[in-house]
Amino acid sequence: MLPGLTCRPLTTDDVPVWADLLDRAAAVDRPHVRDSPEWLRRSLTADGFDAGTQSLAGFDADGVLRAAAVVELRLGDLAHLRLPCGGVVDPGWRGRGVGRALLAWAERAARDRVARRRRELGRDVTADLQVWAADHRDDLARLCARAGLTPLRYFSTMRRTLPRDRELPAPEVPAGFRLVRFDEHGATGLRDLHNVVFADHWGSQPLTDADWERFVVGNPDYRPGWSWGLLAERADGAAAVDGAAELVAYANVYAHESDWPALGFAQADLGNLGVRRDHRGRGLAQTLLAAVARRAHEVGTAAVTLDVDSENPSGAVGLYERAGYVRVHGDVLFAKAL
C-alpha cells in the first residue's frame, strides 16, 4: 500500500511515535501549527471515527513509523460532507512515492466513509476530500495537484503583538450589554449561539454536541478563563442571564502550547469571534477583541493570533487590522469532489 513500508491502522498506543514523526517532519516543513499528543489521541477516539478504516500507519523494517494519515468527518456535516486528510511522511522517506500512495489511500478511505455516511443519512449529499497546506509548502501543493485536488479557499493567520512595558486599558462595553468571562459566568447557550452566528459563513455547518465537546469545551487547549461573552441587558438595566437568547456575542480563546517552542514565545489563539446578526454594528466585536488582548496580556502571553478567511464578506480582515493585527502567514485549502 505504501512503498517499502508495512501498513496497518493507527492505534492510541502509536500516539508517542506518531508525535515523534510529526516532530521530525516539522523540523523540515516548519508548520504553522502543531498537534499535541493529547489532540492526536482524541482524533483516534472521536465520536464517529473508525480508526480501522480512517487511519493508516506505515512502518519500516526496523519498526519505525515513517508515514501516517487520518481522514476525518464531522457528524454535524449534513448539507455537505467535509473529509479533511491529515498526513505526514518522514523527510528521509520522501521522493519514494510514499506521499502519493498515502494521498491515494486517503481518497479511497474518504470515498468509503462518504458512502457509509450517505447510507446513514438516507440521501445523496455532496462531499469532498480536503487537505490543508501552509502557503510555503510548494511540495504539498504539487502533491495535491497531481492527485486532482485544487485550491478551494485561502486563509490568513494574523497576529497582534502585546506590549511588554504597559498594561492594556479595560475594554469599553457598549450601553445595554455586560461583559462576562466564561470561567466565572459559564457558557450556557454558547453552542447554539455559535451555530446561529456562523450559519452564513462559508463552509460552516452546525456543530453537534459531540463535536462541540471535542473541538471546543473539551479541547485540552481551550481556556474558558481567557474567553468572553457579551450578555444583553433588560430594559431595567438588569442582565438577562437565564437563556441562550441573552448571550449575543462571544470570543473563544485557546492556548496551543505545542506551538510555543517553535515560535519562541507564548501566545493566545482566538479560535472564534461571533456576534449575533441582529446585534452587529454596535461595537461588540471590538469590545471582545479588547477583552481578549487584555486578558492575554494579564496571563503573560506575548501575542494574540487568529485565522480568518481571506474572502470573508463580513469585513473581518479590516476589523482585525484596525485592532492591531497583521498578517504573518497563510494556508490554502485544497479539495476534490467525491
Image (spheres, grey):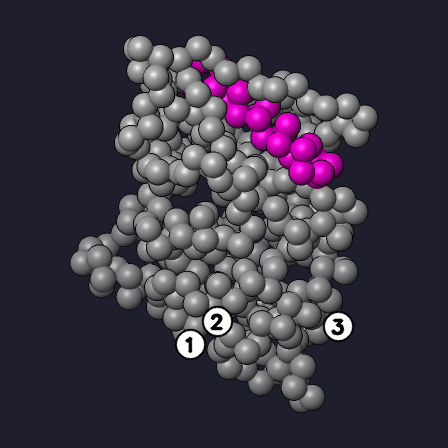
Q: Which of marks 1 and 3 is in front?
A: 1
Question: What residue is disc 2 on?
Answer: 55
> Distance of mark 3 from mark 2, alpha carbons?
21 Å
**Earlier residue among tags 3 and 2:** 2
Residue bearing mark 3: 92
Q: Which amino acid does label 3 sit on?
A: Gly
- Residue 73, x across and y down, in percent: 39, 58
Does the CB distance between marks 2 and 1 fall below 8 Å? yes
- Seen from the viewer's position, the closer of residues 59 and 255 is 255
Other-residue count near label 2 (Cα within 10 Å), few / some / many at <14 / 14–19 / ≥20: many
* Image position of 204 with respect to 315: above or below: below
Q: Which residue is drawn at 57% across and 56% down?
A: 144
> Which residue was labeled with disc 1?
52
Give the residue at x 73% y 29%: 162
Inter-mark Cα distance, 2 to 1: 6 Å
Which residue range is magenta in the image?
Answer: 280-303
Magenta stretch holds residue 113:
no
Q: Quadrant of residue 69?
A: bottom right
Give, as a three-letter code, the residue at label 2: Ser
Q: Tags 3 and 2 in contact by the CB under 8 Å rule?
A: no
